[in-house]
Image (cartoon, coloured by chain):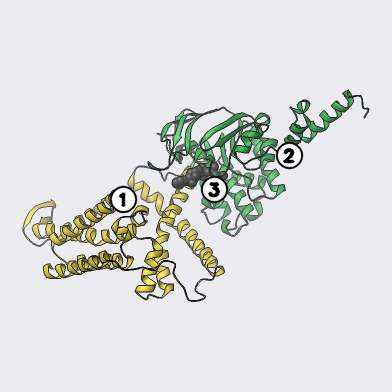
Amino acid sequence: MISIRNLTYRYNKKAPLILDHINLEIGHGEFVALIGQNGAGKTTLLKQLNGLLRPSSGSVTINGLDTATTRTSELARHIGYLFQNPDHQIFCNTVYDEIRFGLVNIKCQPELIDERIRKISGLLGLDHILARNPFTLSRGERQRVALASVLALETDILVLDEPTTGQDYKECMEIMEIVKSLNEQGKTIIMVSHDMEVVGDYCKRTIILNNGRVLEDDETSIVLRKSQSLGMSGLEPPQIIQLALRLGSSFHKVNSPEEMAKTIISCTVSGGVRV
Amino acid sequence: MKQMLEYVHGNSIFHRLNPLIKLIWAFVTCVACFISSSHLFLLGVLLMTIVIAGISGVLGRAMGVFKALLVLGLFLMLFQLLFTPHGRVYFYILPGVPVTDLGLSFSLLLMLKMMAALSPLSLMLMLTPMNELLTAMTHNLRVPYRYAFVVVTALRFIPTFSQEMDQIMQAQRSRGHETDTRNPFKKVRVILPMCIPLLISSVRRVETMAISLETRGFCTGPRSCRKKLGFTLFDLLAIIIVVAVLLLSIAIG
Ligand SMILES: Nc1ncnc2c1ncn2[C@@H]1O[C@H](COP(=O)(O)OP(=O)(O)OP(=O)(O)O)[C@@H](O)[C@H]1O
Ligand SMILES: [Mg+2]
């Protein structure tokens, strides 16, 4: 359970306000997308969640712990945090050690550690490069190493700052499928993405952040239909929703190609055309 | 650390002073402080630095630097105090470890020396943009561009490194490593292993930078500079003051 009350933040006293009176409640098992243009304050907001940054005023509470008084290393038991840039996160000399690092810190039993590393690296297709130095890997591979090191901790909240950047289409889908199945197992997911297709396909709730304020916060299918709010953030609805919007009111529930096909068929049938 | 060396934007007379003079001033004062063994002179230099910082509107920053230097200085002083057994004994800290008048005066001198010698350098960096410093070195002091570039880049990288270190600590903390412990002994133990990742990432960064420099034609031909550095009446005055300080220190020291 995440509760953000009247959160404001500036990087220092004279700097401009980056987060401006943010109020959010995120419950167990939610799958939330945080979107907005470059510099909107998404990363700044995410860093508030595990105490990497602390509120200038207002409060952030995670599972009943106030981030202002709880150390990040303690919050790490509740929240896994994937950095926007994998190179900001990776510091060990082998992929294996990188994934192991957090497990040792949360005092995972030694006999379980190896098992967990094998499991997560299998899931993310890293088993053949466990002995490699992360810095010699490709950008996409490094991103997955970073993700593996976070997922290994098996925290109930996952905060992912652009988990799919640098991935080709197939990897992107695979990562999102993993995240989706974690969500189905009851984990809370909060992710930043610039890919509206991914947001539309996977996230149940979407929050638009604009100049440090919450501009929209609702079900994804509703938020992605607000062309004006999206436009203010330099975004566009996913193509399927753009098409649905143009097709008129009977398509207001269409969010996927399957629904599109069904609705088209039922419209044409009810219009008297035989299919 | 970051604050000690970063340029603070401003338009005071000291900001506008010819960078060459600031460079010479900082250097001369630094040397003078090392030569001098007069408490009074060193205090004077410190006072002068504070006044200049005040006029230039960077007093807040400078005070931060003084505080950091003071902590360092106190450590130095403590050690010096314990290892100077000569002179009149005031009292014993531990059995066999006396505090003497000579020890006190000498360790105080050492502390003042360090503070007075380093603060002008730090102030100079706060008041001079890097590229002006570079121009002053290459065009006025005839330092070959390559070497001047190395010096300036080294300075400019210190804040970058401290950011990098912060970044790694954030990454470790968010995976449950206690880099945020309040216990100073534990903190040292936790931070030491970080030096290796920091070193590796620095080397990588330098490599990337070297490539980036080469692809943009570093040192392939003669350089020109956009801004010519002129001397004004105030610059002249400043030179006279700098020379006077040097002479004074020789006279007192
Ligand atoms: N360490 C910092 N110090 C000062 N200002 C910062 C710092 N980090 C970010 N900012 C400023 O805060 C604002 C929001 O940055 P943030 O990184 O949260 O944006 P973002 O929404 O994550 O953007 P992006 O989509 O590019 O990742 C920006 O204007 C940025 O310049
Ligand atoms: Mg960001």
Residue type for callout 1: Arg
Disc 3 element: helix
Residue type for callout 3: Arg
**Mark number for residue A239?**
2
Question: Is residue A139 visible to us here?
Answer: yes
Give percent across and percent down for residue A51: 45, 38
**Mark number for residue B61?**
1
Which residue is at a point 44% across and 67% down the rendered structure image? B226
Real-space CA distance between mark 2 and mark 1, rounded to the nearest whole angstrom: 52 Å
Q: Which residue is mark 3?
A: A100
Q: Which chain is drawn using green?
A: A
Give percent across and percent down for residue A108: 52, 41
Determine the image quadrant of residue B156: bottom left
**Mark number for residue A8?**
none
Q: Give the quarter of the figure containing the C terminus of chain B.
A: bottom left
Real-space CA distance between mark 1 and mark 3, rounded to the nearest whole angstrom: 41 Å
Query: Alpha-carbon neighbours of circle 3 within 10 Å: few (<14), some, or many (≥20)?
Result: many
In terms of depth relative to the viewer, which is nearer, A203 or B40? B40
